[in-house]
Image (cartoon, rainbow, N blue to C red):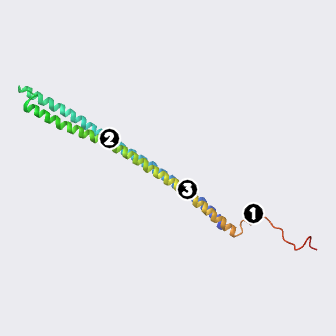
Amino acid sequence: MEAIGPALKVFGAIQQMQMAKAQQQMYNMQAKQAEMQARANVLRTRAETLNHKRQGIEVLKKISSNLATINARAAAGSIDPFSGSVANLAIYNLGKGVTDFFTSKENQELMQLQGQVIEAGGAIQSAQYVAAGNMARRQGYINAAATLGEGAYMANQTGGFDFFKPSTPKYTGGMGSEA
């Protein structure tokens, strides 16, 4: 009956080690999930980056179209398209278009940088989960060792390790054999 306590301690230690491994696996899965979520967010920002790039191209096309329209209408009315109010209109149109284009280009660059930040954040979060998993496993093993130590102490207190003790000869009280 005295061996039940130490045996339960051994069983408890095994359970602690198994729970530690399971907790590490859970953290590793969370790390994978953090990486996948970061990748999805990076892809989303890349799509937005491409959208800004497309907008910039559309702005350039519109500038070209507007300038061609201004020149064609001025020329159709026998007006010099490169001087006077027609030229001012063209310069104004060009200025607004260039501002829109560079705004779109800056948005594109910002989205690229945001994607890099998201990717780095996902990697950091993943590393934190992996580290937490490793720590949980180590802590589980330490707890298991402590539980085994408690079991060994209990076994020693109840005489469970007496068979390891060397037998000592009994003192007979004299120099020889007893009569």
Residue contact between numbered discs 1 and 2, judged by CB atoms under 8 Å: no
Of circles 3 and 2, which is in front?
3
Circle 3: residue type: Arg
Could you tell me which secondary element the residue under label 3 belongs to? Answer: helix
* Mark 3 or 2, nearer chain start: 2
Near mark 3 (Cα within 10 A), the count class, few <14, some 14-19 or many ≥20, is some
- The image's mark for residue 179 is none
Q: How many marks?
A: 3
**Left or right position of 158 against 29:** right
Quarter residue 83 falls in: top left
Query: Within 10 angstroms of label 1, few (less than 14), some, or many (20 or more) residues?
Result: few
Q: CA distance from mark 3 to mark 1?
A: 31 Å
Q: Which mark is residue 164?
A: 1
**Horizontal placement of 132 versus 147: left or right?**
left
User: Does residue 175 lie above or below 33 as drawn?
Assistant: below
- Callout 2 amino acid: Ala
How much space separates mark 1 and mark 2, taking CA atoms? 72 Å
Left or right of 165? Residue 37 is left
Instruction: Report the disc number at residue 47.
Output: 2
For image coordinates 63% across by 65% down, the residue present is 150
Q: Quadrant of residue 102?
A: top left
Q: CA distance from mark 3 to mark 2?
A: 42 Å
Quarter of the image with the N terminus is: bottom right
Residue 99 vs residue 60, the one in the foreground: 99
**Picture coordinates of residue 26, whole percent (x, y):** 49, 53
Q: Is residue 8 something that shows in the picture? A: no
Disc assigned to residue 138: 3
Q: Nearer the viewer, residue 88 or 132?
A: 88
Quarter of the rendering occupied by the C terminus: bottom right
Q: Position of residue 41 (x, y in %)?
A: 36, 46
Q: Position of residue 17 (x, y in %)?
A: 58, 57
- Looking at the image, is mark 1 or mark 2 earlier in the sequence? 2
